[in-house]
Amino acid sequence: MSNHEQFLTEAVHLAVENVGNAGGPFGAVIVKDGKVIAKGVNRVTALHDPTAHAEVMAIREACTKLQSFTLTGCTLYTSCEPCPMCLGAIYWARLENVYYAADRKDAAKALFDDDFIYQEIGIDPKDRGLPFVQLTLNQSQLPFDAWSKQVNRTSY
């Protein structure tokens, strides 16, 4: 068994174990330099937090452990193809690679269907199923102006 298969198998086992702990069927492992540095399982219902997906939980743990908001040089292994929210978090965290076991079609068969979100992303905000309304305010650029003037900011 390759290292990739070993780490991915660990993510799958975390997912199965999490189901036994009243959690969702998702697990994730983050590896750096050949060692597991973080693990995450789906804790959405346990924490009453819709963002507590396995990948996000693992990213949070890895960032805390490394004291960094980026995970350059790290690889994510996840039991299922990441949802759109997790995909965004993965890109923001700057992970090097992602390996996954089941795909979004497998998740949909188990009633975890994120396809509507993938579709919503490409739709003009005002035409989405959940309306997004931009209101024009004179102050709308103030946060960006303040950011631009900040000399000791940390870019990300």
Image: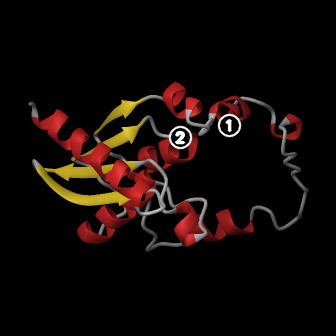
Residue that mark 2 sits on: 83
Residue 147: quadrant of the picture: bottom right
Residue at image position (91%, 56%) is 135
Does 63 appear above or below 25? Answer: below
Count of numbered circles on the image: 2
The mark found on residue 6 in the picture is: none
Residue 78: quadrant of the picture: top left
* Side (left or right) of 150 relative to 71: right
Q: Point out the residue furthest to the top here.
A: 105
Task: Decide which of 81, 46 is in the foreground and name it.
Answer: 46
Q: How is the image coloured?
A: secondary structure
Task: Decide which of 155, 43 is in the foreground and name it.
Answer: 43
Task: Decide which of 40, 145 is in the foreground and name it.
Answer: 40
Residue at image position (56%, 40%) is 84
* Side (left or right) of 34 relative to 68: left
Q: CA distance from mark 2 to mark 1?
A: 9 Å
Instruction: Give the residue type at disc 2.
Output: Cys
* Side (left or right) of 120 relative to 1: right
Does 81 appear above or below 138? Answer: above
In the rendered image, residue 18, in percent from the top left (x then y), is placed at: 39, 57
Is disc 2 placed on a helix, strand or loop? Answer: loop
In the rendered image, residue 113, in percent from the top left (x then y), is placed at: 62, 35
Instruction: Give the residue type at disc 1.
Output: Ile
Residue that mark 1 sits on: 117
Q: Is residue 126 visible?
A: yes
Mark 2–mark 1 CB contact (< 8 Å): yes
Residue 115: quadrant of the picture: top right
Residue at image position (21%, 47%) is 73
Quadrant position of the N terminus in the picture: top left
In the rendered image, residue 36, in percent from the top left (x then y), is placed at: 17, 55
